[in-house]
Every structure is written in structure tokens, then in C-alpha cells.
Image: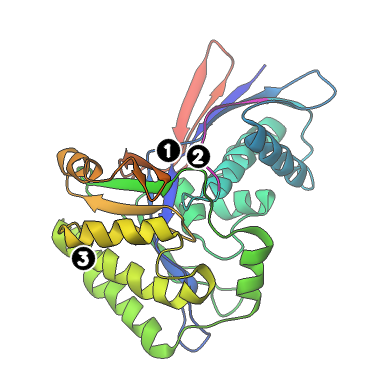
């Protein structure tokens, strides 16, 4: 019986650009794929009448939802699915999209005996990528991604550029324990208001991407990258402040960032709706030095700190019998 294993990374998204057809960049922006935290799932067909899912309670529910959505398109029999490592949901790490794409990729292989390398096909199956394409393309390609947003017409392809992040760089991930960012109906309600950014703000953000972030990565200019990602994150955060309360969604994170910046530590930017933030580091040692400055608890809120490597290769898939496993990258 065929076994399929899929391993993904997670993603940081430094904020959607809400442009217009005139300014472009409708739901565009920048983000990066990380090696940790990761999803690792194993799935195979089962003779049982219903799906057998082995995961945490919340993840079990999400897996069941994705399988139901995928079966709207694929003829997939009951499966046995186990989750060996997880990405926390609604913390700014794109956990839902990466899980959905991983299950969709495995389902295509089980149902149709084919590997699908088109991430948009997988996103359609899992009903993801409603706005941003960074997590979708990042699933296949990894790296730092520049999403130019929705095209003017359905006949045009979406433009998402990808460049490799220097392998030595790290990202310090900080989030309040037991807190989640904006999601679900409240998030959809916000975007359904069709709130748009001013033309000068869109131009400023695009200039920072093209003139600062991209050359800083390509030339491995860490300090320039760190300052630019902080400035980009602050500018986007001010736009969303009316919905999330400030540049940073969680009050404890606001205080922490102020403390770190006062100590000369720069680069903090919220990912998506947070509450998690990331701070870039030039090396593992630099990342550890930043992590050591973060208190275990602040204002009665426990903080979780992790150090993540960039993921420049995208997700991986292994399939075959238990004795013979064939591995491949989606790219």
C-alpha cells in the first residue's frame, strides 16, 4: 500500500499591500519561507469506513475540513493520516495554508497517482489563497517571495518573484503563548470593506521592496535588510492599526519591541495579523543573542521564542511502499 509523506515549512508575511487596479499590488506584499516550525504528515489509504486521523485536537478538525473540501474535486477513499510535527494556527506562520497544500498534494498522489507541481491547483483543491499567494508559491519554491498581487484580469498570470535568502541568516520568532491573531469571519469582514491604501503609501512600500529589500538580500547586506523590513512592517502596521489596535496587535509585543529597539535591536516586524513577530539575525549566534534578550514573561504574559532557518527549497514529498520510498521536491 502506498504511503505518502509531505514535509513543509512555515511562512512569514510582512503585510498585505491593499492597492487598487490603478496602483497595482492588490493583496500583494513580501514574505519568507522558514524551515521551522514545520508540518510533517504521513497519509495512506485505509480499509476503514472513515478517515483515521492522528493529531492534536485542533489539527484533527482542520485535517477533516481539508479532506472534505478536497473530496469536492477528487475521488479520495478513506485515509489514515498522522501528523508528526505541527505549525501553530493563527500566529502569523501560515499554518493553515501549508497544511492544506500538503494534504492536497498527498491526496492527488493517492487518488490520481500523480504529483502536482502547480501550487495554485493545490490551493484550489484545499480552498486556500483567498488573497495572498506568498504561502502558496512558497510551498513549492521556498525563499523570499515578492507577490505583485492580483492581476487585472483572470487571463493574466499572477506575478510572484522568488529570491534565495542567505543560508546563514536566521529569524527569531517571538509570540505570546496562548494568543492568536485576527482570522476567520472578522478578517473577511475587514477585507470586504474594500479598505485601500493611499497611492503614496503603495508607492512607498513598493519602493522599499524594489530599492531596499531585494538588493539587500541579493547582496547579502544584512543591516540594510533588517532596517528595511522594520520600516516596511511599521508602515503596513500603521495602516492596519485601526483594526488590530496599533502597529503590533498584542500589547505585550508592543512593549517588548519598544524595549528591544531601545537596546539597539532592530528588524522586528509582525507577520500577517500576528500576534507573532520575527526579528532577522545575521547568524545563529546573533539570533541566540537576540533571543537571550527576550524575557520568559512580560506583564504576566509568557513569551515563546524560537530560532528559525530560511527555507529555500520548498516542501518535500516522499512516496512509495514502506520498503521503497521515492523522494522529490515540489519545485
Q: Position of residue 155 (x, y in %)?
A: 60, 73
Above or below residue 257? Residue 6 is above
- The reply to whether dot 1 and dot 2 touch (C-beta < 8 Å) is yes
The region drawn magenta spans 81-89
Above or below residue 206? Residue 313 is above
Neighbor class of circle 1 (other Cα within 10 Å; few <14, some 14-19, many 20+) is many
Neighbor class of circle 2 (other Cα within 10 Å; few <14, some 14-19, many 20+) is many
| Mark 2 element type | loop
Label annotation for residue 224: none
Left or right: 15, with 171 as reference point: right
User: Which of 57 and 96 lies nearest the eye of the viewer?
Assistant: 57
Farthest residue to the front: give it. 300
Tell me how far mark 3 sits from mark 2, CA to CA. Answer: 27 Å
Tell me how far mark 3 sits from mark 1, CA to CA. Answer: 25 Å
Label annotation for residue 87: 2
Q: Residue at x 47, y 83 (%)?
A: 197
| Mark 1 element type | loop
Which residue has dot 1 on it? 37
Above or below residue 281? Residue 79 is above
N-terminal of the pair, mark 3 or mark 2, is: 2
User: Which of 17 and 78 lies nearest the eye of the viewer?
Assistant: 17
User: Which of 125 and 222 lies nearest the eye of the viewer?
Assistant: 222
Label annotation for residue 227: 3
Within the magenta stretch, is there residue 141?
no
Amino acid at each position: 500500500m502506498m504511503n505518502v509523506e509531505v514535509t513543509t515549512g512555515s511562512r512569514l508575511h510582512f503585510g498585505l499591500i491593499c492597492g487598487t487596479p490603478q496602483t497595482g499590488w492588490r493583496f500583494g506584499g513580501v514574505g519568507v519561507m522558514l524551515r521551522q516550525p514545520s508540518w510533517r504528515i504521513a497519509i495512506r489509504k485505509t480499509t476503514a469506513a472513515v478517515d483515521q486521523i492522528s493529531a492534536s485536537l485542533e489539527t484533527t478538525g482542520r485535517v477533516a475540513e481539508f479532506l472534505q473540501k478536497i473530496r469536492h474535486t477528487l475521488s479520495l477513499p478513506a485515509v489514515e493520516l498522522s501528523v508528526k510535527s505541527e505549525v501553530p494556527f493563527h500566529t502569523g506562520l501560515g499554518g493553515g495554508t501549508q497544511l492544506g497544500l500538503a494534504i492536497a498534494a498527498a491526496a492527488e498522489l493517492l487518488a490520481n497517482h500523480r504529483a502536482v507541481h502547480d501550487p495554485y491547483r493545490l490551493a484550489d483543491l484545499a480552498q486556500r489563497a483567498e488573497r495572498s499567494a506568498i504561502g502558496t508559491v512558497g510551498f513549492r519554491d521556498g525563499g523570499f517571495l515578492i507577490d505583485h498581487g492580483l492581476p487585472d484580469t483572470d487571463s493574466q498570470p499572477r506575478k510572484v518573484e522568488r529570491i534565495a535568502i542567505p543560508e546563514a541568516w536566521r529569524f527569531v520568532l517571538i509570540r505570546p503563548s496562548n494568543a492568536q491573531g485576527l482570522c476567520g469571519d472578522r478578517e473577511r469582514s475587514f477585507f470586504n470593506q474594500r479598505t485601500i491604501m493611499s497611492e503614496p503609501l503603495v508607492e512607498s512600500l513598493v519602493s522599499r521592496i524594489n530599492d531596499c529589500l531585494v538588493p539587500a538580500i541579493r547582496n547579502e547586506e544584512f543591516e540594510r535588510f533588517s532596517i528595511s523590513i522594520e520600516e516596511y512592517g511599521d508602515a503596513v502596521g500603521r495602516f492596519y492599526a485601526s483594526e488590530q489596535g496599533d502597529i503590533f496587535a498584542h500589547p505585550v509585543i508592543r512593549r517588548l519591541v519598544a524595549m528591544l529597539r531601545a537596546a539597539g535591536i532592530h528588524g522586528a516586524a509582525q507577520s500577517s495579523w500576528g500576534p507573532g513577530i520575527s526579528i532577522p539575525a545575521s547568524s545563529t549566534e546573533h539570533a541566540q543573542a537576540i533571543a537571550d534578550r527576550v524575557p520568559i514573561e512580560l506583564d504576566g504574559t509568557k513569551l515563546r521564542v524560537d530560532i528559525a532557518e530560511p527555507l529555500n527549497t520548498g516542501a518535500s514529498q516522499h512516496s512509495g511502499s514502506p520498503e521503497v520510498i521515492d523522494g522529490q521536491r515540489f519545485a
